[in-house]
Amino acid sequence: MHELSHIILEHQPSIDEDLKSLGLLLRNYDEIHENEANWLGGCLQIPFDGLVTALLKGKSNEEIALQYGASIDMVKFRANKSGARQKLYFIKNKKR
């Protein structure tokens, strides 16, 4: 999803010309583009509503990772940075 995000966002990579002359084509993106691709890639892989639903069901990070074919680190990243944990807290406290 990360690499697909670069394409969707129309990021233009820089290509290492020294490696290109050796027959290797390595693409590099600047830090801003990498951060954008990390964010969008995570959103594409683990949708917000699906994440909140999984958390409401009490699924563990490992179970969510398996469900979405993601790493545990990506689940933690999405849960913490997307606002899903805050929404979960709001939903649980609203029911009281």
Image: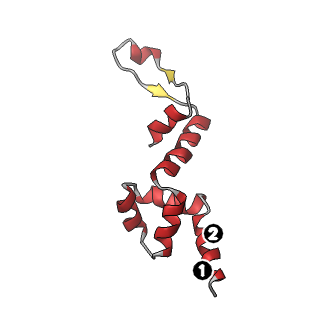
Q: Which mark is residue 64?
A: none
- In depth, the one of 86 and 19 nearer the eye is 86
Figure quadrant of the C terminus: bottom right
Res 92 label: 1
Expressed as whole percent of the image width and height from the top left, the position of residue 42 reads 50, 50
Position in image of residue 5 (x %, y %): 50, 38
- Mark 1 or 2: the one toward you: 1
Which residue extends farthest bottom?
96
**Quarter of the view holding residue 24:** top left
72, 48: nearer the viewer: 48
Percent position of residue 1, x then y: 44, 43
Q: Which residue is drawn at 46% across and 69% down?
A: 54
Q: How far apart are marks 1 and 2 (CA)?
A: 10 Å
Amino acid tagged 2: Gln
Q: Give the image quarter of residue 57.
A: bottom left
Amino acid type, callout 1 = Lys
- At label 1, counting other C-alpha atoms closer than 10 Å, the crowd grade (few under 14, some 14-19, many 20 or more) is few
Determine the residue located farthest toward the top in the rendered image.
21
**Secondary element at image label 2:** helix
> On screen, 5 above or below 39?
above
Number of numbered discs overlaid on the protein picture: 2
What percent of the width, then of the height, locates residue 28?
A: 49, 28
Q: Which numbered marker is on residue 86?
A: 2
